[in-house]
């Protein structure tokens, strides 16, 4: 993992929205860059294969937002697009 990725995983930078996703019967609340980054990178790449472009956009946006909190709007929008397309929201 790169230094940026480590920063993204550990980032407490708040997103512009809190996402509540129901997964396997449990609700997962995602409100920070780090939570979102861990959520979308800990799932298997096979699970995201259908949405690989949106997934790549979201990962990149989260990595950038971890280093610059002004980019959380773009990261939030990228996550929203991914989650809506994957029918998680």
Image (spheres, rainbow, N blue to C red):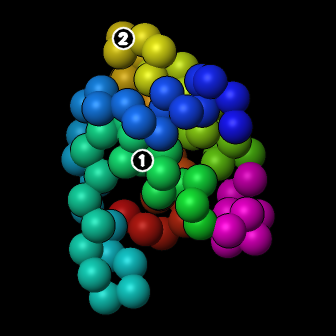
Disc 2, SS: helix
- Left or right: 57, with 17 as reference point: right
- Left or right: 83, with 18 as reference point: right
* Residue 7 in picture, x, y percent from top left: 49, 27
* Residue 72 in picture, x, y percent from top left: 37, 24
Question: Residue at horizontal 73%, vertical 63%?
Answer: 45
Who is closer to the viewer here, 70 or 42? 42
Residue 70 badge: 2
Relative to 42, residue 57 above or below: above
Q: Is residue 21 magenta?
A: no
Q: How packed is label 1: few (under 14 Cα within 10 Å), some, or many (20 or more)?
A: many
* Residue 53 in picture, x, y percent from top left: 74, 46
Quarter location, residue 27: bottom left
Quarter location, residue 40: bottom right
- The residue carrying mark 1 is 36
Do the numbered discs 2 and 1 sit on residues whose CB atoms are within 8 Å? no
Who is closer to the viewer here, 89 or 75? 75
Quarter location, residue 50: bottom right
Q: Which span is picked out in magenta? A: 44-52
């Amino acid at each position: 993992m790169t230094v940026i990725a480590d920063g993204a995983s550990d980032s407490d930078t708040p997103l512009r929205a809190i996402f509540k996703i129901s997964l396997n019967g449990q609700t997962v609340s995602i409100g920070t860059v780090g939570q979102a980054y861990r959520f979308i990178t800990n799932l298997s790449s096979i699970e995201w294969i259908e949405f690989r472009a949106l997934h790549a956009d979201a990962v990149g946006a989260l990595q950038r937002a971890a280093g610059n909190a002004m980019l959380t709007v773009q990261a939030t929008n990228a996550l929203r697009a991914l989650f809506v397309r994957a029918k998680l929201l």
